[in-house]
Image: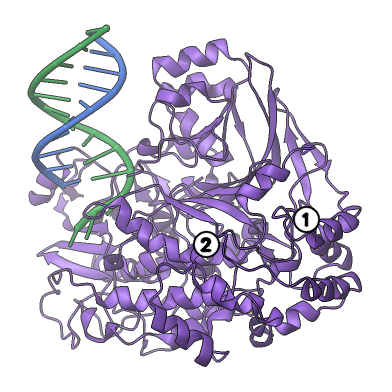
Chain colours: A purple, B blue, C green
Amino acid sequence: MSSFQGQMAEYPSISIDRFDRENLRARAYFLSHCHKDHMKGLRAPALKRRLECSLKVYLYCSPVTKELLLTSPKYRFWEKRIISIEIETPTQISLVDEASGEKEEIVVTLLPAGHCPGSVMFLFQGDNGTVLYTGDFRLAKGEAARMELLHCGGRVKDIQSVYLDTTFCDPKFYQIPSRGECLSGILELVRSWITRSPYHVVWLNCKAAYGYEYLFTNLSEEFGLQVHVNKLDMFRNMPDILHHLTTDRSTQIHACRHPKAEEYFQWNKLPCGITSKNRISLHTISIKPSTMWFGERTRKTNVIVRTGESSYRACFSFHSSYSEIKDFLSYICPVNAYPNVIPIGTTVDKVIEILKPLCRSSQNTEPKYKPLGQLKRARTTHLDSVPPEEEEEENDLFDDPLPVPLRHKVPNQQTHHPEVFPMTEVSQNQPENLRQSTGCIKAKSMKTSLWANFIDCEESNSESEEELPIPASGQGDPSPPHQQKTDVEVPQWDVFFKRNDDTDCSLENFPSSTEAGGSQSPKLFSDSDGESTHISSQNSSQSTHISEQGSQGWDSQSDTVLLSSQERNGGDSTSVNKGSYRPRVKENLPGSQMEQNVLCPKDTYSEDVNVVSSAGEPTTVSSGKHIPQERKLLTLSTNADSQSSSDFEIPATPEAELPKQEHLQYLYEKLATGESIVLKKRKSSLLDT
DNA sequence: GCGATCAGTT
DNA sequence: CACAACTGATCGC
């Protein structure tokens, strides 16, 4: 449950996912997805009144979220005041204070979050830096690296703060089987049951919340049976979901709900009330999606667990696992990361302790200075969370053979070109001072991820935990279901090696359907088995789009979906051709763009930006003009005490040394002549190519 | 009577 | 186990 209070330090005049208390004064509202715990205050009289008085206040969200929200009569009063923003479309919004007339411009980009239909993350760019609010998300490892709009010039943007979904940010949730794995397990269980007779039905015991739609659509697709649900009008404009649902109770797959459902089920009655068909009584099993996780990824574990005569639990998660969170955050590598959720059983401090080493300030940035032969020690003093010995080791021994750099699709040598922000008409003057405080230079280094890996491993074995789910009755599962502990201590380096390199991150991530015996793929379910198929296809995750005529919706991201080697009849084609989420980090940048990025002192917005006026009419505005900043960069950077823009991260600590002037000069010359000497000197770049 | 909050359930 | 949401009880306006 989110405990985010609605406001971000950098942009306190907007509120996200909270609409009560101080948020009542916000200049603009953002809703990441349609779950109640992110909608607090959204229909309260106080906010209603505010809307009536402040005619320029709008709620921004994805088109799907808007649709879902407005389906409920309780929120209908928002109708005229919601502006939906397309996914991955940078959009400028004017934040106007109606009392003072004061105005601030901000650019927001919605990124698919994989949590439920319409769910997005918000990337904000403005005078106080770039910040990312993740909302709730589930993204597989490597997905951040594939989000084009998180990048600029092939590098991840300079992000000041991330407001992060930390629901499972606890080593005990080290790994959660992928969507594809979970889906396959459920598909096979359902298949094994409903093929017995037309009177064999399954009941999916799902919560009353968005997020199961891709499960329904895949089941429907697979078996040609619509899924029975209580309500489907909210999907009336999302045909790709709608077509797989029905309110006709005669289907073999049910996801209907009733307050006394569990009780009904005891009596072989479905929540919708039926017990028989053609006067023949039904044979029913229940499958309850719930979150199960693995201690580490090589352990074979069932994604389906039998919990009773006719009851099963199926692995299913709306949220990223611990390792997925770490992968995400270490890739983004912000200056700050703030947890939106404090998982029960843990504390804010513990969560922060996990996040901190993945952020910039605690990174070992030493390699960056290597070319200069300076500052090594100065930097290491910043590593509060790193044991000294390990640090030594790293410096001396791990010079390069480590896999880490591969985690970043593109080496993060952004030192020499802090990305710039400003879209022309928006940013004006300001910010040298602001910039300083927000730290515009990226200190990302490969060491970064290295530490992350170490920590992963350590923490994962320190875990003790869960009890074993009841293994299914009579089945010869040779390996005990949950075994995290045993071999966790051995860092799974190879895993990190393989993942996220330049080619295709998703492939490593997903057990290929062809590698039969399935080294890593969990056993699908404990009961029938043997021929546990490895269907890794799944068309999707959580849609963020409303299809114009039906080709999208719930499909979209989830790379795992796309790589399914099994061509599924028809269904997949829709998800695959949906270009909405095909982010590829630009590896070959057009020369001009590269130039921009190299030269701009701040985050550059090289794309077109949509502008949403207070009237809600989006217009596209191109924001070019960064070229003239070349000179500026040189000037600024040569000035050693300017922290506002530099090719180097200037340590903030007083005792830290600055790079020597001659080294800086040398590098600038190279830069000016277009040589890539800086890159070549970094070990990560050697590894990366 | 509505809404907010809390505890308990699924 | 852990998701998100519903139910019911209680309190205040």
Read off the chain for label 2. Answer: A
Quadrant including the C terminus of chain A: bottom right
At horizontal 73% and vertical 55% (from top left) the residue drawn is A642
Residue highlighted by disc 1? A601
At horizontal 8% and vertical 50% (from top left) the residue drawn is A266
Q: Secondary structure at mark 2?
A: helix
In the rendered image of this protein, does residue A499 appear above or below residue A192? below
Determine which of the numbered discs, if any, sits on residue A361 in the image.
Answer: 2
Q: Quadrant of residue A658?
A: bottom right
The answer to whether residue A569 of the structure is visible from this angle is: no
Depth check: A674 or A388 in front? A388
| Residue situated furthest front in the rendering | A655
Q: Secondary structure at mark 1?
A: loop
Q: How many marks?
A: 2
Depth check: A536 or A488 in front? A488
Cα separation, mark 2 vs mark 1, equals 20 Å
User: Residue A134, percent across and down?
Assistant: 49, 50
A474 lies left or right of A58: left
Amino acid type assigned to the residue bearing label 2 in the image: Ser
Amino acid type assigned to the residue bearing label 1 in the image: Pro
Quadrant including the N terminus of chain A: top left
User: Residue A242, percent across and down?
Assistant: 47, 45
Mark 1 burial class by Cα count in 10 Å: few <14, some 14-19, many 20+: many
At horizontal 88% and vertical 63% (from top left) the residue drawn is A592
Q: Quadrant of residue A81?
A: top right
User: Residue A235, percent across and down?
Assistant: 48, 40
At horizontal 53% and vertical 79% (from top left) the residue drawn is A507
The answer to whether residue A191 of the structure is visible from this angle is: yes
Q: Quadrant of residue A307?
A: bottom left
